[in-house]
Image (cartoon, helix red, strand yellow):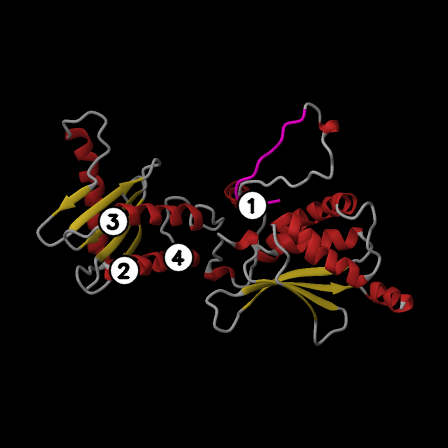
Amino acid sequence: MAAIYNLFIINKSGGLIFYKDYGSAGRMDTNDSLRLASLWHSMHAISQQLSPTIGCFGIELLQADNFDLHCFQSLTGTKFFVVCEPGAQHMEGLLKVIYELYTDFVLKNPFYEMEMPIRCELFDIHLSQAIQKDRVVLLGR
Amino acid sequence: MIGVGGKIKQYSSVLDKPLSKGRQEVSLSAFAFLFSELVQYNQTQVDNIAELERRLEDAGYAVGARVLELFCHREKGNRRETRLLGILSFVHTTVWKVLFGKVADSLEKGTEHEDEYMISEKELLVNRFISIPKDMGTFNCGAFVAGIVRGVLDNAGFPAVVTAHFVPMEGQQRPRTTILIKFADEVLRREAKLV
């Protein structure tokens, strides 16, 4: 069973710039993914304001009955989040790896326009390798 | 030289710095961002892909001309190659090693034409982070490296037309980059006389 259901990357204004689903569970159509991305962006921003702790950076983990949502926000406001099965481990590490791939193969690509949807072949290739590697680690447990 | 990490020694004056100690490395990320900006800037100045390729090649040409001068002094004790195969292996070995930290993957002679040579790289350093969009067709940022090669050859007295191409490899996900060198007639005539 796939541990990760979907991966989202949203730009600093809340637009979905990358979406990919893994496995049949939790698959959604384009409209739903766009809606969820902008909804998450707003919730994340509101949580920063509402948080009782000072200097809060927003929700990092949302736990529900049938999924976990792990979120990582980069310094520039780009958010990476994965929806995965409840209790899945090492997701922070995976998000960091994905962020690294984003900085390498998206930001260093002269043909990528900032804040626009990501269409980079090398990013796709390395991303699927990283996810594959993560699966092997999960199966090995 | 481009690579990861590296130490730069401080000298009080540039004249105190020995020329032979030229093994400094620069950050690969810094280079990748600079190169990306170079491509983006040139993209704003052109209206078609051929023009962009030409501009990148011209940028590389200036690098090649300087690189030849420096490496002949630094690596070869002020001697310059005068024979065709000599200069080709100089490009393939010395130039590649100092610029990219490794020898080029292969140097071959073209099978169809006598005046063609090819330097192939599985993954060219300038292309490491670059994905070409589908609508740009066969465009290759290796044009910059082709320009470097042309700069070296031209200034060493071997005028040539140098182009960069993607060549799909069997069993490989990514195509390799081939730098195709087509020498001018005069070079081959001169070479024939020397034998």
Q: Which mark is residue A135?
A: 2
**Disc 4 marks which amino acid?**
His
The amino acid type found where label 2 is placed reads Arg
- Residue in front for this viewpoint, A49 or B98: B98
Q: What crowding class fits label 4: few (fewer than 14 Cα within 10 Å), some (14-19), or many (20 or more)?
A: some
Q: Chain of mark 4?
A: A
Q: Predominant secondary structure in magenta?
A: loop
Could you tell me how far apart the alpha carbons at marks 3 and 1 are, in whole angstroms?
31 Å
Is residue A131 rendered magenta in the image?
Answer: no
Residue A16 in view here? no
Q: Is residue B157 above or below residue A55?
A: below
The chain letter under disc 1 is B
Q: Chain of mark 3?
A: A
Q: Which residue is mark 1?
A: B3
- Say which amino acid is labelled 1: Gly
Q: CA distance from mark 1 to mark 2?
A: 31 Å
Query: Which residue, given by chain and number where applicable, does mark 4 sit on?
Result: A126
| Foreground tag (4 vs 2) | 2
Task: Identify the residue at horizontal 33%, vertical 59% (top origin).
Answer: A133
